[in-house]
Image: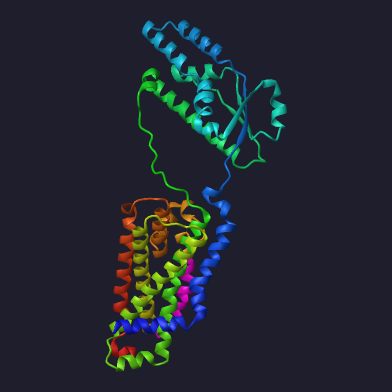
């Protein structure tokens, strides 16, 4: 009997071309518009950062080290302590570290082009718009850092940074680099005050740097293919539940009940109809995006399981909407879901923009929506993660669908009330 109801629902939908266009054609149009229009927003489409930075040094590091050594010798410290401080001063060369290990690193050299400029050219460089930033090292900088780090004296050393406000990203990158360098120097000061030899700190392996994940970047067409698909799958629930209520208005449902057919067969037919239509819709959308926009799914098993569990969850939502429509004898629940709730869920789930990256709270809330959980799982599949890494999303969608079905069963009117 459920199969007969499923056939009925499919025929009703196919006889409404306007609804079919909304469920299939509209998401494809939006994928194309958003994918191409917002292509530069996504990570893989952005242009590389390039910063030209002037480095002006008023300090002579070797002279500062020599001055510090003379200061240490004049303190009259024990020979062992004196030797340790002199060795520490020779190892802790902040300007050399900044030039060779920070800006000279492979990663930063690809981004920042550092030019050492004579101090007398400072005003000329500041007026040169080709520079993103100017770094100025004050006199006696190394001497100050060594005295603070090794002798626990107050430090007055401060690096000056002149930023070109006409450039947005590059000056911020340089500022962040200098901030991290300052934190490193502060850490060295704390280590020195704790009596730890700098030589042992430098040679010890304090930790291991690993890449958390090496995922493929998501481009705009991939992102919006998933975003629009998981958004428009929710409209199936509101559309089919509205059709069901109209059948009640036209006395079709009443005739079904009078024919001694179980109301659970009718509700089950709604649930499975929505599932089948959702699976077909997703197959069409992802099939077209694969052929036209080159959105390729390598893990077909994971792709199938995520979409099946998402369709199961949406089927449960549709069954609940149908039950509530029948309970209050109004189509308002379906209309409210389609016009309001879908938009809210799409926003929280990230269908329009990856809003979860700006707020961890919104990201967490978004993953509790069926579309958000499905989108998170599908995007991770596109990035090449294993199925086990998204199993919790699949499990959540199945549990969500079961909860919706259970609530729908308890909400659906009894036989006498339904008529």
- Residue 245 image position (x, y, % from top left): 41, 85
- Residue 271 image position (x, y, % from top left): 34, 76
Q: Is residue 345 visible?
A: no
Is the stretch drawn in magenta largely helix, strand or loop?
A: helix
In the displayed structure image, the side of residue 315 where residue 28 appears, left or right: right
Residue 56, quarter of the rendered image: top right
Residue 61, quarter of the rendered image: top right
Q: Which sits in the foreground, 74 or 134?
A: 134
Q: Is residue 332 magenta?
A: yes
Tell me what residue is drawn at x 53 percent, y 70 percent: 26
In the displayed structure image, the side of residue 336 where residue 159 appears, left or right: right
In the displayed structure image, the side of residue 271 where residue 103 appears, left or right: right
Q: Which sits in the foreground, 92 or 392?
A: 392
Tell me what residue is drawn at x 62 percent, y 42 percent: 168
Q: Which residues are magenta?
A: 328-344
Q: Is residue 316 visible?
A: yes
- Residue 109 image position (x, y, % from top left): 54, 31
């Amino acid at each position: 009997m459920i199969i007969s109801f499923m056939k009925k629902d499919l025929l009703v939908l196919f006889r409404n071309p306007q609804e079919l266009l909304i469920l299939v054609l509209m998401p494809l149009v939006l994928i194309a518009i958003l994918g191409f229009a917002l292509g530069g927003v996504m990570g893989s489409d952005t242009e590389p950062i390039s910063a030209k930075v002037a480095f002006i040094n008023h300090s002579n590091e070797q002279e500062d080290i020599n001055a510090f050594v003379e200061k240490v010798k004049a303190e009259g410290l024990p020979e062992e302590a004196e030797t340790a401080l002199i060795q520490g001063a020779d190892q802790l060369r902040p300007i050399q570290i900044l030039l060779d290990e920070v800006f000279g690193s492979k990663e930063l050299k690809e981004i920042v082009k550092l030019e050492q400029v004579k101090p007398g050219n400072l005003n000329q460089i500041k007026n040169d718009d080709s520079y993103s930033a100017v770094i100025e090292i004050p006199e006696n900088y190394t001497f100050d850092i060594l005295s603070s780090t090794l002798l626990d004296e107050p430090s007055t050393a401060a690096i000056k940074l002149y930023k070109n406000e006409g450039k947005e990203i590059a000056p911020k990158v340089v500022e962040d680099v200098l901030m991290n360098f300052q934190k490193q120097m502060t850490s060295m000061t704390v280590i020195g005050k704790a009596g730890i030899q700098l030589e042992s700190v430098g040679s010890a392996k304090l930790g291991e740097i690993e890449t958390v994940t090496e995922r493929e970047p998501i481009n705009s067409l991939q992102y919006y293919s998933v975003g629009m698909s998981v958004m428009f799958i929710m409209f199936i629930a509101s559309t089919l539940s509205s059709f069901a209520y109209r059948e009640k208005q036209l006395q079709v449902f009443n005739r079904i009940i009078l024919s001694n057919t179980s109301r659970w067969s009718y509700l089950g037919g709604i649930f499975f109809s929505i599932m089948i239509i959702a699976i077909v819709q997703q197959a069409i959308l992802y099939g077209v995006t694969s052929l036209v926009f080159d959105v390729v799914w390598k893990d077909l098993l994971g792709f199938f399981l995520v979409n099946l569990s998402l369709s199961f969850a949406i089927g449960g939502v549709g069954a609940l909407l149908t039950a509530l429509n029948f309970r209050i004898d109004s189509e308002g629940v379906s209309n409210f879901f389609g016009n309001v709730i879908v938009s809210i869920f799409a926003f929280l789930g990230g269908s329009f923009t990856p809003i979860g990256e700006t707020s961890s709270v919104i990201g967490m809330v978004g993953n509790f929506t069926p579309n958000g959980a499905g989108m998170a799982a599908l995007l991770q599949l596109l990035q090449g993660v294993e199925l086990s890494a998204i199993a919790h999303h699949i499990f959540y969608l199945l549990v969500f669908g079961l909860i919706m079905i259970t609530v729908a069963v308890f909400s659906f009117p009894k036989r006498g009330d339904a008529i």
